[in-house]
């Protein structure tokens, strides 16, 4: 599927739209979380927003509850739209913990998945096992998106620990590293218990990360998305986006919502002259 897409408003607002990357994108990734879209909903998503969606993650272990033939059809439709499709990392964690990593990767390929997520958000995956999972997935021809961070708010990693793991994963050849925030966007990663950005954690993480362009920031909440766009630019990589919010997020990226229009009109650098207010 071509990255070009004829915008409905053309040159009427063309000056604002030039800053966005087009598929296939290296930056400005939009990764959605799918918790149970049916085939017709997938068709609607591909038709309406396929040019805007880069990744689809079938959240946690939700895909295990589907009929295999149905799942394969669903995955195939998304792949046809030029989208990297992968099961949630919780499924890989469960497969590794029960000694079925090889079978899991084989079945992922059989079902048509083009990627996998390697995470240790719940299960303690030793560094050697994490490396093995990444290398096996790459050997299978899958795009690997790793994830750093813990789902339990009581067991959070430090920014230095997250950056170290991100650097190690990138060195192994993963396409992107996701910073954990869960579906809730609260009490994990760069977000505090109320869902606001902890600027101390974010600043430390940004200073330590080896390659920000290959970081996917989970940001399921609107205010979180707006903050990161204003702070890091329209082409920041964002994940855990709800399927129904893709167009709204794109408007936010392009400066066509309240939070970002003024910055787009003034052509200010991302976040200038100050950080966005909560």
Image (cartoon, rainbow, N blue to C red):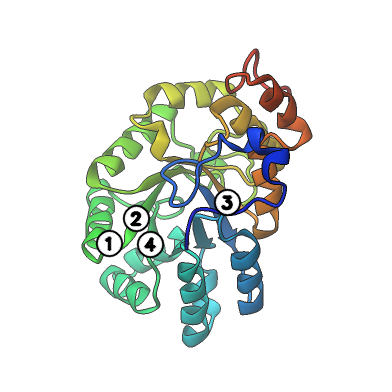
Q: Which residue is mark 4?
A: 115
Calculate the distance from the C-alpha at mark 3 to the C-alpha at mark 1. Answer: 22 Å
Left/right of residue 142 with respect to residue 216 in the rendered view? left
Who comes first in sequence, dot 2 or dot 4? Answer: 4
The answer to which image quadrant residue 102 occupies is: bottom left
Calculate the distance from the C-alpha at mark 4 to the C-alpha at mark 1. Answer: 8 Å
Q: Residue at x 44, y 27 (%)?
A: 205
Question: x, y percentage for residue 271?
Answer: 61, 21
Q: Which mark is residue 240?
A: 3
Residue 120 higher or lower than 80, as above or below: above
Q: Which residue is mark 2?
A: 144
Mark 1, other Cα within 10 Å: few <14 / some 14–19 / many ≥20 = many
Residue at the far top in the pictured view:
273
Q: Which mark is residue 137?
A: 1
Question: x, y percentage for residue 175?
Answer: 34, 48
Question: x, y percentage for residue 69?
Answer: 48, 87
Labels 2 & 4 near each other (Cβ < 8 A): yes
């Amino acid at each position: 599927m071509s990255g070009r897409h004829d915008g409905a408003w053309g040159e009427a607002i063309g000056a604002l739209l030039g800053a966005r990357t087009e598929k296939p994108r290296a930056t400005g990734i939009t990764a959605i979380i799918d918790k149970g879209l049916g085939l017709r909903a997938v068709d609607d998503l591909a038709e309406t927003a396929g040019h805007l969606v880069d990744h689809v993650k079938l959240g946690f272990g939700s895909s295990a509850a589907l009929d295999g033939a149905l799942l394969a059809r669903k995955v195939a439709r998304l792949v046809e739209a030029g989208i990297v499709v992968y099961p949630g990392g919780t499924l890989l964690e469960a497969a590794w913990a029960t000694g079925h990593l090889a079978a899991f990767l084989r079945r992922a390929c059989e079902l048509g998945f083009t990627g996998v997520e390697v995470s240790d958000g719940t299960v303690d995956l030793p560094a050697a096992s994490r490396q093995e999972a990444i290398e096996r997935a790459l050997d299978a021809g899958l795009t690997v998106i790793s994830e750093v961070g813990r789902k339990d708010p009581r067991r959070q990693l430090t920014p230095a620990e997250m950056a170290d793991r991100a650097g190690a994963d990138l060195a192994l050849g993963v396409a992107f590293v996701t910073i954990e925030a869960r579906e809730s966007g609260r009490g994990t990663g760069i977000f505090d218990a109320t869902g606001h950005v902890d600027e101390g954690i974010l600043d430390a993480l940004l200073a330590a990360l080896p390659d920000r362009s290959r970081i996917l920031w989970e940001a399921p909440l609107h205010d979180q998305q707006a903050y990161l766009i204003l702070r890091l630019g329209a082409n920041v990589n964002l994940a855990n986006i709800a399927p129904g919010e893709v167009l709204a997020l794109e408007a936010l990226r392009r400066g066509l919502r309240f939070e970002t229009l003024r910055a787009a009109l003034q052509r200010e650098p991302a976040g200038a002259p100050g950080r966005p207010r909560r």
